[in-house]
Structures are given as C-alpha cells and as structure tokens.
C-alpha cells in the first residue's frame, strides 16, 4: 500500500503546485466565486494527473492491478475523494463551467 499512497500524494502535490502556479491568472474577484474557480482549477489538474497515471499504468500493469489501483481508491487520500464527490455534485447542480 505504501507505493500507492506515495503515488496519490504525488498526484495531489503536482495538482496543488500547478494550481499555485496559475492562481495569478484566475480573473475572478475574491470571495466564494474565487474559491469555486480555484477548486475547479485544482479538480482539472487532479483529473489530468489521474488520467496520465492511468494511461501509463495501462502500458505496464495488468488489468487486475489497474482495477486495484483505480477502484480501490488507494491512490487518493480520503480528502481528495471527498473533494471529487463534492465537485461532481456541484457540476450536476449548476450545469455550468466556472
């Protein structure tokens, strides 16, 4: 489990680093809308790095190993799983891009 945990933390760290790199480019005033825009950007980076991870995994891992990686959720800390659930709910309710 330790390698999966390290992978998950690396994905989250990369997403946070990218978010911090573009915060000055987000043209939304401070407040709730700014927070939503930053959460959206973080989610996009997180999704990107997860996608790249799974593409790479499909080249070197068996189907069983990939299912364990993805479905087990071991690659993502619980906090990120929560953020993803909240974000999906937000998108369903608002049906718009921030």
Image (spheres, rainbow, N blue to C red):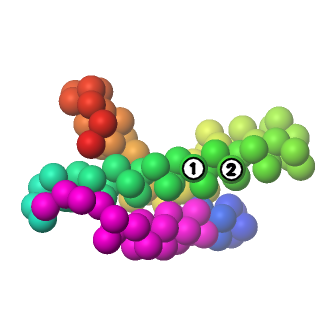
Q: Is residue 17 one of those drawn in magenta?
A: yes
| Residue 41 image point, x, y percent | 38, 54
Q: Mark 2 sits on what residue? A: 52
Q: Mark 1 sits on what residue? A: 48
Within 10 angstroms of label 2, few (less than 14), some, or many (20 or more) residues? few
Q: Nearer the viewer, residue 98 or 7?
A: 98
Q: Quarter-wise, where is residue 96 in the image?
A: top left
Q: Quarter-wise, where is residue 72 in the image?
A: top right
Residue at 50 percent of width and 54 percent of height: 46
Judged from this view, the residue extending furthest toward the left is 31
22 left or right, relative to 14: left
Find residue 27 and name its label.
Answer: none
| Residue 22 image point, x, y percent | 40, 67
Above or below, 16 relative to 40: below
| Residue 93 image point, x, y percent | 22, 28
46 left or right, relative to 30: right
Q: Nearer the viewer, residue 12 or 33?
A: 33
Above or below, 42 relative to 44: below
| Residue 27 image point, x, y percent | 24, 59
Can see residue 13? yes
Give the prevailing secondary structure in the magenta stretch: helix
Residue at 89 percent of width and 49 percent of height: 60
Can see residue 65? no
Q: Helix, strand or loop at disc 2?
A: helix
The stretch in magenta equals: 9-29
């Amino acid at each position: 489990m330790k390698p999966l945990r390290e992978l998950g933390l690396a994905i989250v760290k990369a997403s946070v680093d990218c978010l911090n790199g573009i915060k000055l480019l987000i043209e939304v005033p401070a407040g709730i809308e700014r927070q939503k825009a930053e959460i959206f950007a973080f989610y996009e980076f997180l999704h990107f790095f997860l996608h790249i991870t799974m593409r790479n995994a499909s080249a070197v891992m068996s189907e069983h190993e990939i299912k364990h990686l993805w479905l087990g959720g071991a690659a993502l800390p619980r906090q990120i799983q929560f953020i993803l659930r909240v974000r999906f709910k937000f998108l369903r309710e608002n049906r718009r891009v921030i």
